[in-house]
Amino acid sequence: QAGCEIVGRSDNKFPDGSYSMNLVLAESHLYIHTYPSQGYACVDITACGESQPWKIVGVLTELFSCEKYGYHRVQRPLKMDKYREDKS
């Protein structure tokens, strides 16, 4: 749905029921960390190119049966050249 290609995955389940997952995407990454005792999950999605990572938010809110959620979208610059120091 988001146009991202999964190229790697690692999962960790913890004794307290918490769960962490890291998806390595061809476009970057997606991390999920859950805290069931607090009814909380934290998701970090970073992507580039033609992908549409914000579409993942809807999928995850349904998957986790979220009663409420918030998100913050950061638009990063397409070209990093203007942030590099000129060493000439």
Image (cartoon, grey):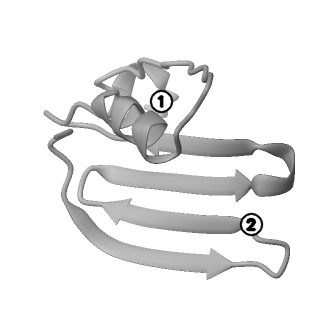
**Residue 18, numbered label:** 2
Determine the residue positioned at 24% across, 59% down. Answer: 26
| Quadrant (top left, top right, bottom left, bottom right) of the C terminus | top left
State the SS at label 2: loop
In the picture, measured across the screen, residue 14 lies left or right of residue 52, that is right
Where is residue 82 drawn, in percent x and y? 40, 19
Q: Earlier in the sequence, mark 1 or mark 2?
A: 2
Determine the residue positioned at 86% across, 54% down. Answer: 37
**Which residue type carries mark 2?**
Ser
In the picture, measured across the screen, residue 40 lies left or right of residue 45, that is right
State the SS at label 1: loop
Q: Quadrant of residue 70?
A: top right
Where is residue 58 drawn, in percent x and y? 36, 30
Q: Quadrant of residue 59?
A: top left
Say above or below: 21 vs 3: below
Which residue, given by chain and number where applicable, does mark 1 sit on? 84
- Which of 64/23 is in front? 64
Determine the residue positioned at 56% across, 18% down. Answer: 72
Where is residue 23 drawn, in percent x and y? 41, 64
**Which residue type carries mark 1?**
Arg
Mark 1 and mark 2 in contact? Answer it, CB < 8 Å: no
| Quadrant (top left, top right, bottom left, bottom right) of the N terminus | top left
Where is residue 76 drawn, in percent x and y? 42, 22
Report the mark closest to the observer, 1 or 2. 2
